[in-house]
Image (spheres, rainbow, N blue to C red):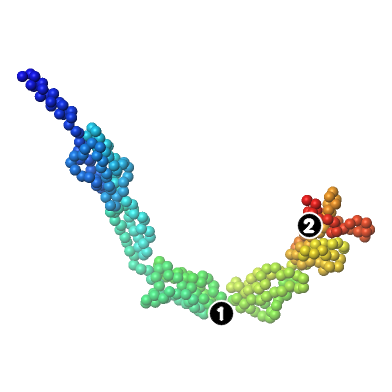
Amino acid sequence: MYSLALLLCVAALTHSALAVKVCPKPPEVLFATINVVKNEYNVGEEIEYTCRPGFVPNNGQRKYICQPNGRWPLNTLLCLPKRCPTPGLLQHGTIDSRDFHYQSSLKCCVFPAVTCAPPSIPEFGVLSYRLLKPGNISYFMDTIVFECVPPLALIGNETATCQANGTWSSIPECRAVTCPAPTGIENGFLNFAVRRTYHYNESVSFSCQSRYVLEGPKHSRCEKTGNWSTKPSCKEPCKIPVKKAVVLYEGEKKRVQSDLKEGIMHGETISFYCKNKEKSCAYTVPVQCVNGNLTLPFCFKERGFFSSLVKTDPSNMKPCEDLK
């Protein structure tokens, strides 16, 4: 009898040891679904969670495997609502919300459209630009552009804007502006100018005396301030401050005493020949005329009558660059 009981007990233990363990139904994750849904899962079987539309996974993993001990690994997956982009500004209204996640809502407050009546046109003025709308009405932030009938000057902003209070920003005025007869410039003159009063936007032109160089705008214009715009100036030519020398001018050798008796004009450049005593060669140093001023290079030595008879002029010596 005892042998039979012992045999039954051993058989029960053996069956229990050989029984295959299974995992129960996995835990639910809020706002997620499982790819395979059943009551029991075999060891090694894999499941995968997917967040519902409008939600995205955050923290934790999506795939889990049934363990040999019949349990699922710790599930830390979270499915959170997606965030929508900021809706931006609402024309003629406001948006009252700070939550822009999936399934949240916005509260909008729309204001009545702000309109402006037709603007008052300044005397002797015209509208050069206006976007016509039904009812001849302009709306908030609409703009218009004014012009004045010549020769009147537009004083103020040429553009006006329909404001939030239903009025236009400042309207300009058209005013008669005159400038006195223009004066001449030093070492120059006015071209065909009549001595009279000039109106806004009229202009005169200038020229310089012979060998003087005009620098600046050739024309001066009567401005809305009643003054003339900037006038040009006439820059003086330069006399070459040596009696006798050979220089390089516009790529050619020139004699100061004969070829350049009148000097050079403002902005022009000449090059003086200097001697390198150690190498017995010559090199050139450029000098520019600046409004009547021309400074000789320090290395240049003007030759007298006797030295020119016995010594070679630097302009006739071999260039130093040929010795490199």
Total count of labels? 2
Q: Can residue 290 be seen from the camera position used here?
A: yes
Q: Mark 2 is on which residue type?
A: Val
Question: Which label was assigned to residue 150?
Answer: 1
**Left-right relation of 306 to 149:** right
Splitting the image into 4 quarters, where does residue 11 fall? top left
Q: Quadrant of residue 43?
A: top left
Identity of the residue furthest to the left in this view: 1
* Label 1 crowd (10 A; few <14 / some 14-19 / many >=20): some
Q: Residue furthest top?
A: 2
User: Image point 53% across, 77% down: which residue?
Assistant: 148
281 to the left or right of 6:
right
In this rendering, the answer to whether 39 lies above or below 112 is above
The x, y position of residue 164, in whole percent, is 40, 66
Residue 183 in sight = no
Nearer to us in this view, 314 or 169 = 314
**Label 2 SS:** strand
Label 2, label 1: how many angstroms apart (C-alpha)? 56 Å
Task: Look at label 1 and name its amino acid.
Answer: Pro
Q: Which residue is mark 2?
A: 285
Residue 253 x %, y % = 82, 63
Residue 101 location, x and y as percent? 31, 52
- At horizontal 70% and vertical 74% (from top left) the residue drawn is 206
Badges 2 and 1: C-beta atoms under 8 Å apart? no
Along the line of sight, which residue is nearer the eye, 84 or 76?
76
Q: Please, what secondary structure does the residue beneath circle 1 have?
A: loop
84 or 144: nearer the viewer: 84
